[in-house]
Structure formats: structure tokens, C-alpha cells
Image (cartoon, rainbow, N blue to C red):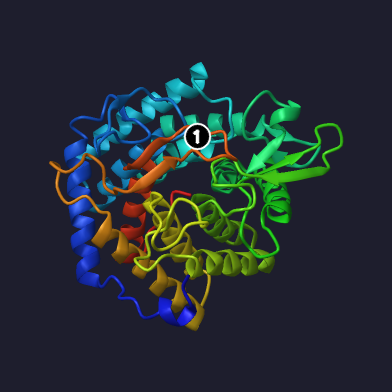
Amino acid sequence: MQTKESLISYDMMNEEQAKEALQLAVSLVEGNVDEFTDCFPDSNSQDNFYPKSENIEWTTGFWTGEIWLAYEETGSEKLKHAGEVQVESFLDRILKRVDVDHHDMGFLYSPSCVAAWQLTGNETAKKAALLAADNLMSRFCEKGQFFQAWGQLGAPDNYRLIIDCLLNMPLLFWASEVTGDAKYADHAKAHITTAMRYIVRPDYSTYHTYFFNPETGEPVKGVTHQGHRHGSAWTRGQAWGIYGSAMAYRYIKDTAYLEIFEKVTEYFLLHLPSDLIPYWDFDFDDGSTEPRDSSSAAIAACGMLEMARHMTGEKAQYYQDMAKRLLLALRNHCAVTSKEQSNGLLMHGTYARKSDENPCANRGVDECNTWGDYYYLEGLVRIHRDWKSYW
């Protein structure tokens, strides 16, 4: 456990360290494009190296997002070409409905296609992202006012939202912006309202998932899906809460989300171990033999840097500084340093860890994962310059 006093005693990533870490990460992405242009890295590495994958699951957009982040830094035509090839794959995926019967359209299409549209004016990317937004809209549940995460719509055993979906909402705000149709943003606001009401506990830890009654829309219960137990705080879920509440405030400007951000962030920071690399669940602390989840620290750092842009004075400085402390810890303990070590960017992540109270199988334990790589790179870009978000 940390205190506010102990947290501010850690070193922060300075400008030179940030520049060096960013240059290294970008060079690694440039090298990995040779392998992953016409295909994608799997969601997680195996022995620190990603196998090749088709454009499936919820994670492929993060790799394409790395390509666009690296392109912004270099202006490389090779990277631009790779990003455009992948945009075509994302259009094909949504047109053919390949593994899209879920809510993760933002994770897939914001860092891939919204980014491409924003950076290059790619019309294929715009078309694909709008189709993805429409697909997400089809999962809105009027009874309960939320986007159902998985499963057959209305099915009692899956009539739920999950905290991750807060990061899918920016796709809908973008869709309203480019189409002039408020329906996308209105549904996003409704989902955020519901999620924040039920998924944040009184102590500002968070549930991973919350069930509702499909007949009435009434709240039923919060449980875990990937955490250690139903009453614990799954670390990545808490990080989604940090970045998700920052995004909610950015788009809605409701001060309630500012307060939620501050409280869920405080919970995350105070429960970090001494090296600042979180375990996969906050049930675990120094001395545990359980695996870490470096991706959670990267997500949290990006969320703090996002919210700091909407703050002033000491508060803005505090969250900028804490993000730099997390990024320095990631650079020192988890960052890939050569292509011989890994074809990822950030080691020591955990996709899923089995426990007695979750339905998961062990997957990607102490490995790289694509979202950890992406958010680590996004965090480095954010502290290097004034970055226009893809989200």
C-alpha cells in the first residue's frame, strides 16, 4: 500500500528519458511492420513473441494504433502504407461481420480507422468506423440504458455491461461529430450514466461487470469476470475506470465525472506495490507470487494525462507527474529493449488469470499484450508533445 507522500517521492520520467523511450518504441514498431502488415499480432505474446493472427478478437485495433502513432512521429510512408492496408482489413471485417457481435467497436475502430481518418482523411477508414459505430448502436438496451457487452441480446445470463466499454464510447461521440446526428452521443451519454451509477463502489473500487434485469432494466448485481473475486478490484478494470471517467468528463463536462476520476485514480495509486507495477488484481501486494499486469499502469497513465488536459494548476501537475512516474517504472521494469527480446513493446502483462470466482482460463500471463503495447506508446507520445487523441 502507498500513501500520497510515498507516491510523490518516486522519480518521474524526464524529457530525455521520454524521448529515448519513444524513439526506441517507434523503432520497434517500424521493425515489426515487416511481419505484421497483412496480418495482426495475436492478442498476447507467447514467450514474449506474438504469433500471427487474422483480424479477429477485440484487440487488433491496438496494433494498427501503434502504426499510426509511429507514423505521426516519423512521417514514414512505409508505416502509412501499413496502416492503410489494415484499414482495408477493418472495412472488410465489419462488412462481413467477422467477430463483431460484441461492444468492443471502439477498441477496434478508434485507434485504427478514426486515427487514419484524422491523420490522412482516408474515406475507407471513415466508412468503416461509422459502420462500427452503427454496429455498436445495435447493442443498446433500452431497459437499463446501456450497451450489452457480449452474448445474444437480451439473454438473461449476459444482460450486462462491463467497465471496459467506457473506452468504446468515444467512437460514438466521434460518429455524432462527423455525421451531425446526435443519436450516437445521446446513447453514449446514457450508457456512461448507467455505468457510473452502478459500476463504481462506495470505496471507489470498481466492479468489472454489472447485471441488469432484462425485463425491467433494474440493477441486479455486480460481479467479476476477470478479477480475483467478486469483491476485489481487478486492476485493469480500475484502469479502464480512470481513463473512462476522464473521457466521460472530456465529452460531457459533468463535474461528477471529475470527482469519480479523482477517487478511482486515488484507489489505483494507493494500492500500487513498491515498484509501481500493479499486480493483476489489487488483492495482491508486495511479496505476492501472483503475476503483474503492466498494461494497467499504461492505461492509467494515459487516463491521467488525458484528464490533466482538462485541469489547471496543482491538480493538473499532480496527475501529469504521477503518469510520468508510472511510465518511468514501466520503462525501467517492463519495456522491451530490442527486437531479439520480443516483438512487443511492454512485457509483464496479464490477459486473464484463473481464480475460484472467475470463469477465465490462464491466458497471456506474464506476456506482452497488444493493448499494453499501445497504451505505453500512447503515454510516451502524450508526454512528448500535445497529441490529438484518436479517442
Where on the picture, by quarter, is residue 41? top left
Q: Position of residue 56 (x, y in %)?
A: 43, 25
Name above or below for residue 170 compared with residue 58: below
Q: At 22% across and 47% down in the image, what residue appears?
A: 75
Taking depth in this image into account, of 380 and 57 the one nearest to the observer is 57
> What kind of residue is marked 1?
Ala
Taking depth in this image into account, of 23 and 237 the one nearest to the observer is 237
In-image side of 262 versus 122 (left or right): right
Name above or below for residue 221 compared with residue 283: above
Residue 180 makes an appearance in the image: yes
- Count of picture labels: 1
Residue 120 makes an appearance in the image: no
Element on which disc 1 rests: helix
Where on the picture, by quarter, is residue 333? bottom left
Q: Position of residue 23 (x, y in %)?
A: 19, 56
Residue farthest to the right? 216
Q: At 33% across and 63% down in the image, what residue appears?
A: 327
Taking depth in this image into account, of 149 and 39 the one nearest to the observer is 149
In-image side of 75 versus 387 (left or right): left
Q: At 22% across and 59% down in the image, what residue appears?
A: 21
Name above or below for residue 102 compared with residue 307: above
Q: Position of residue 154 (x, y in %)?
A: 75, 27
In-image side of 57 versus 154 (left or right): left
Name above or below for residue 318 compared with residue 61: below
Q: Position of residue 343 (x, y in %)?
A: 22, 39
Q: Residues within 10 Å of mark 1 (few under 14, many from 20)?
A: many
Q: Which residue is mark 1?
A: 129
